[in-house]
Image: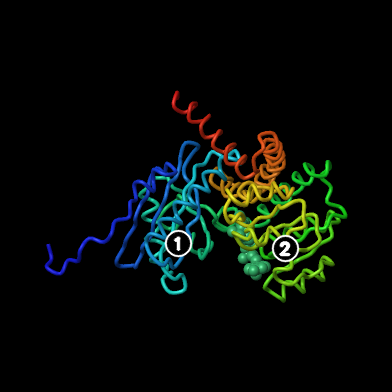
Amino acid sequence: MSTNQTATPASIDIFSQLQQHDHEKLVFCQDEHTGLKAIIAIHNTVLGPGLGGTRIWNYANDADAINDVLRLSRGMTYKAAISGLNLGGAKAVIIGDAKTIKTEALMRKFGRFVENLNGKYITAEDVNTTTRDMEYVNMETSHVVGLPESMGGGGDPSPVTAYGTYMGMKATVKHVYGNESLTGKKVAVQGIGKVGGHLLEHLHKEGAKLYISDINEEMLARFAKMYGATVVNGDDIYSTDAEIFAPCALGAILNTENINKLKCKVIAGAANNQLADENVHGPMLVEKGIAYAPDFLINAGGLINVYQEHIGYNRDTAFRNTEHIYNVTLDIMKAAEKSGTHTQKAAIEMAEKRIHDILKVRSTY
Ligand code: NAD
């Protein structure tokens, strides 16, 4: 024992964190040579290998990184389960500032760690990682998706995500208005990036009246001209007099303050984790008479796309399977109404039921 050893720091009770939501595995990856510090969380592999992207983030401390990777991997389990995919949920985080730490060697070393899990974890791109990074990962492991089309991958998932969001929106509109048509409906889209931009194209084609907000002025001007959309300033998007609100930028925007401003009847957008606190804001939307299309269901097109890549890529099949989001959204709307709960809860219950049912099938194999 070295003489300058410091006292043991206050412990983080990792096992009770894993037990809280029944995570299967948490893998810590460290490499001094490349500076890699990564954590891979595998939440549940009943339905298949855990798939989830790798996020690079400069966490304030290790506990924050652990919290994030546990939360995100659990979300992936639900997303895969509700989408009818034979995939489990997992996620990885690499700790550090992407601008300074990201190198070919670091990504390849991370790929070695993924390879060591023998396919129990399949990685993909996420915040601060790109297709190019996944190419480096792919030099060390085949357990990676989200590769460019030139390498047999599925390319940019955003058009598929946007299509699924559009399907989820139409189903929610059908539930609320009795028919799915968006012709003449006013839709307020927050964030017109990769997904929001493609969503606008579908909405415009169907004759919706569009309201858009973004922090990128140049894109606002371009889309306003292209689709005759009305530009809305910043947070005014919440109080826009539109029947439908589509959050396609940031998470946690459905908080008490913003929900109080909403005039819409339907919320259907692609952003991840829209409800600031699902136990508070899910019921609050029900009380306000707003139908909320669960984000993890209607933005699953991207996951459906990479799943296709995992089993042999075909773009048409990816779009066809994404269309199924329409029926599942309708089922969830009805289930939530019947049981008097909010849609996010109904969707989680439906995902959990599928895992539970398949667990019985596989345990008898
Ligand atoms: P993106 O970065 O291309 O687009 C996001 C847009 O939001 C940008 O144009 C940005 O300028 C804008 N924005 C940022 N802050 C804003 C604010 N305060 N108000 C209004 N606009 C703001 O990202 P994306 O790929 O289009 O993803 C959008 C959302 O959908 C994200 O939450 C993402 O996690 C989620 N999502 C994306 C995919 C996918 O396939 N790309 C899949 C599932 C979920």
For the residues labelled 2 and 1, the Cα–Cα distance comes to 41 Å
Q: Residue at x 79, y 64 (%)?
A: 211
For disc 2, the marked residue is 238
The N terminus sits in image quarter: bottom left
In the image, is 219 to the left or to the right of 182?
left
Q: Residue at x 88, y 55 (%)?
A: 184
The C terminus sits in image quarter: top left
Picture coordinates of residue 323 (x, y %)?
Answer: 71, 43
Q: Is residue 7 above or below residue 320?
A: below
User: The residue tagged with tag 1: helix, strand or loop?
Assistant: helix
Q: Mark 1 or mark 2, which is nearer the start of the sequence? A: 1
Task: Establish whether ligand 1 lies closer than 8 Å to the Cβ of label 2.
Answer: no
Give the amino acid at mark 2. Answer: Tyr
Q: Residue at x 75, y 44 (%)?
A: 171
User: The residue tagged with tag 2: helix, strand or loop?
Assistant: loop
Residue furthest right in the image: 184
Question: Crowding at label 1, few (<14), some or many (≥20) Cα neighbours within 10 Å?
Answer: some
Q: Residue at x 62, y 39 (%)?
A: 346
Front residue of 136/125: it is 125
Count up the numbered dots. Answer: 2
Picture coordinates of residue 168 (x, y %)?
Answer: 71, 47
Give the amino acid at mark 1. Answer: Tyr
Residue furthest bottom in the image: 218
Query: What label sits on residue 293 in the rendered view?
Result: none
Question: Which marked residue is nearer to the observer: mark 2 or mark 1?
Answer: 2
In the image, is 12 to the left or to the right of 168?
left
Front residue of 139/263: it is 263
Q: Is residue 137 visible?
A: yes
For disc 1, the marked residue is 136
Picture coordinates of residue 58 (x, y %)?
Answer: 44, 68
